[in-house]
Image: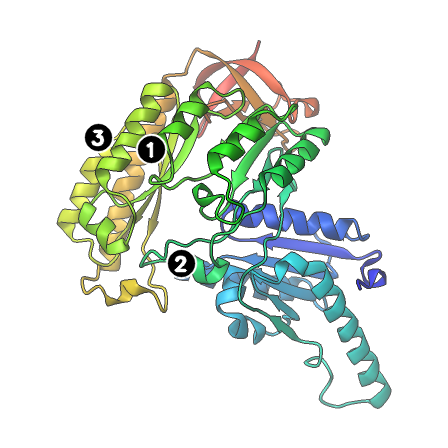
């Protein structure tokens, strides 16, 4: 039973680290608390509740999580501090020992976040009252401290936009792949998903709320259907028929799960955009084997070729990891040459990070940090060359752009169907353009080449 009284007239602060899925879940948590009378703390206000949704994809991510927790505790003295997410799942005891943390929720428990928060907060208030009555010298603050992590089986639905224009619909969670470098299956559990019917219902609700674009998120969304016996292609076809949603984007899809049939459907669909994000991780077959990835370069190249054949204007983003164990100089050069030849748009580059308990630690060849940095720079330079070249093709063209909310007096930004970032100058931007599909003419690059300048038609 939720004790709704503890939430009345409270202020909450949220901090999210990591992937789009985390941001989607945090937004849903905020919506749930809002329905109980909790409002989001404004800038400079001290919060009564702080929620940190953590990531643990790298050692750097772990460090950022600890920094964020310490900062939230310092900035909001006395607030009820809740930590959830992947780092909370993998290092629950370590997180619980951070001064100021009240409640640690694992991936299984965050589906019932409000109930756990209600129980823990009620226990905290009871403990504080007992301390006041007895005058206990050592305090009762540890009596309500709670760590909740169990085997991960639940699925926490999420479809919300938070402060963003686009909605993020969680269609799947967990992963069964167990790549040698990765802890995600331990942090998120095995692959699981809701029904297509429930997801279509959430998309219809987003449309009723005025949403025009939905991003499909998950950990390994191409694995959709293991729980329900359905398929991702079936899901895409069903969502394509939801009236009011003008655009869908697929957040990330493993190349071995990106079927030719799915590519063909997206090419002729009403609302699925010519925009793909495909994890490669390495352009060396030897490194892919060491990573226990389930494809080779040939399969990846086939998917890129098919997408470009069916959708020549498609934006293709690619995840690449550099410096993993076993990546010799020759392997990296093979990867660099492969990506140089690929007709992709942008690279998401990140250095390999040793994760405790992973099979990669048994691979003998270790890449020096200096080499990781140099390799990252080479791939990031290549990425920028490819992105700018892609953008240049659309200078002078007419495009449809979904604009996103901007700070008053600042430039407004949005994206074309194929994910070219567009900038509307402050003197042209209007608040009513937020979440509107507008036709524009694309001009030259803006000052830092992060977007193309636009004029309204």
- Most foreground residue, 440 or 225: 225
- Most foreground residue, 78 or 313: 313
Residue 317 drawn above or below residue 228: above
Mark seen at residue 325: none
Q: Helix, strand, or loop for circle 3?
A: helix
Per the image, the residue denoted by label 3 is 341
- Most foreground residue, 451 or 329: 329
Q: Nearer the viewer, mark 1 or mark 3?
A: 3
Per the image, the residue denoted by label 2 is 58
Q: Residue at x 80, y 84 (%)?
A: 131
Question: Do the numbered discs 1 and 2 sit on residues whose CB atoms are within 8 Å?
Answer: no
Image-based side of 292 in relation to 143, left or right: left
Q: Residue furthest left?
A: 330
Tell me the quarter of the image containing the C terminus: top right
Q: Helix, strand, or loop for circle 1?
A: helix
* Residue at mark 3 to residue at mark 2: CA–CA distance: 29 Å
Question: Do the numbered discs 1 and 3 sit on residues whose CB atoms are within 8 Å?
Answer: no
Residue 428 locus on image (x, y percent): 62, 18
* Residue at mark 1 to residue at mark 2: CA–CA distance: 24 Å
Q: Helix, strand, or loop for circle 2?
A: loop
Q: Residue furthest front?
A: 229
* Residue at mark 1 to residue at mark 3: CA–CA distance: 15 Å
């Amino acid at each position: 039973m939720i004790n709704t009284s503890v939430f009345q007239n409270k202020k909450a602060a949220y901090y999210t680290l990591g992937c789009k899925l985390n941001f989607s879940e945090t937004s849903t948590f905020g919506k749930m608390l809002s329905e109980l009378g909790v409002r989001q703390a404004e800038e400079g206000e001290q919060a009564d509740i702080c929620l940190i949704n953590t990531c643990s994809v790298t050692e750097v991510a772990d460090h950022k999580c600890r920094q964020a927790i310490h900062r939230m505790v310092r900035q909001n003295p006395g607030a009820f501090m809740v930590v959830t997410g992947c780092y909370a799942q993998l290092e629950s005891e370590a997180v619980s020992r951070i001064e100021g943390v009240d409640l640690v929720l694992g991936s299984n428990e965050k589906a019932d976040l409000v109930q756990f928060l209600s129980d823990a907060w009620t226990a905290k208030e009871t403990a504080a009252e007992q301390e006041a009555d007895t005058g206990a010298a050592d305090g009762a603050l540890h009596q309500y401290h709670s760590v909740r992590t169990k085997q991960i089986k639940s699925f926490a639905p999420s479809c919300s936009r938070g402060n963003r224009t686009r909605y993020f619909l969680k269609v799947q969670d967990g992963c069964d792949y167990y790549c040698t470098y990765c802890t995600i299956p331990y942090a998120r559990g095995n692959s699981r998903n809701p029904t297509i019917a429930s997801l279509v219902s959430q998309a219809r609700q987003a449309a009723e709320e005025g949403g025009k674009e939905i991003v499909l998120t998950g950990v390994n969304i191409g694995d959709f259907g293991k729980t329900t016996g359905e398929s991702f292609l079936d899901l895409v076809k069903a969502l394509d028929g939801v009236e009011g949603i003008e655009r869908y984007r697929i957040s990330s899809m493993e190349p071995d799960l990106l079927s030719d049939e799915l590519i063909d459907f997206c090419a002729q669909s009403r609302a699925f955009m010519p925009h793909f994000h495909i994890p490669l991780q390495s352009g060396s077959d030897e490194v892919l084997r060491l990573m226990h990835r389930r494809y080779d370069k040939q399969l990846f190249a086939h998917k890129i070729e098919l997408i470009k054949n069916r959708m020549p204007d498609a934006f293709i983003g690619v995840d690449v990891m550099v410096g993993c164990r076993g990546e010799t100089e020759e392997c990296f050069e093979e990867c660099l040459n492969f990506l140089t030849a690929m007709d992709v748009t942008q690279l998401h580059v990140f250095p390999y990070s040793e994760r405790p308990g992973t099979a990669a630690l048994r691979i003998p060849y270790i890449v020096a940090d200096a080499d990781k940095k140099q390799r990252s720079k080479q791939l990031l330079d290549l990425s920028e060359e490819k992105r700018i070249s892609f953008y240049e093709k659309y200078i002078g063209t007419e495009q449809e752009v979904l604009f996103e909310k901007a700070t008053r007096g600042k430039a407004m930004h949005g994206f074309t169907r194929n994910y070219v970032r567009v900038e509307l100058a402050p003197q042209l931007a209007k608040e009513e353009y937020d979440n509107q599909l507008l036709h524009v003419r694309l001009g030259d690059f803006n000052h830092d080449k992060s977007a193309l300048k636009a004029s309204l038609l």
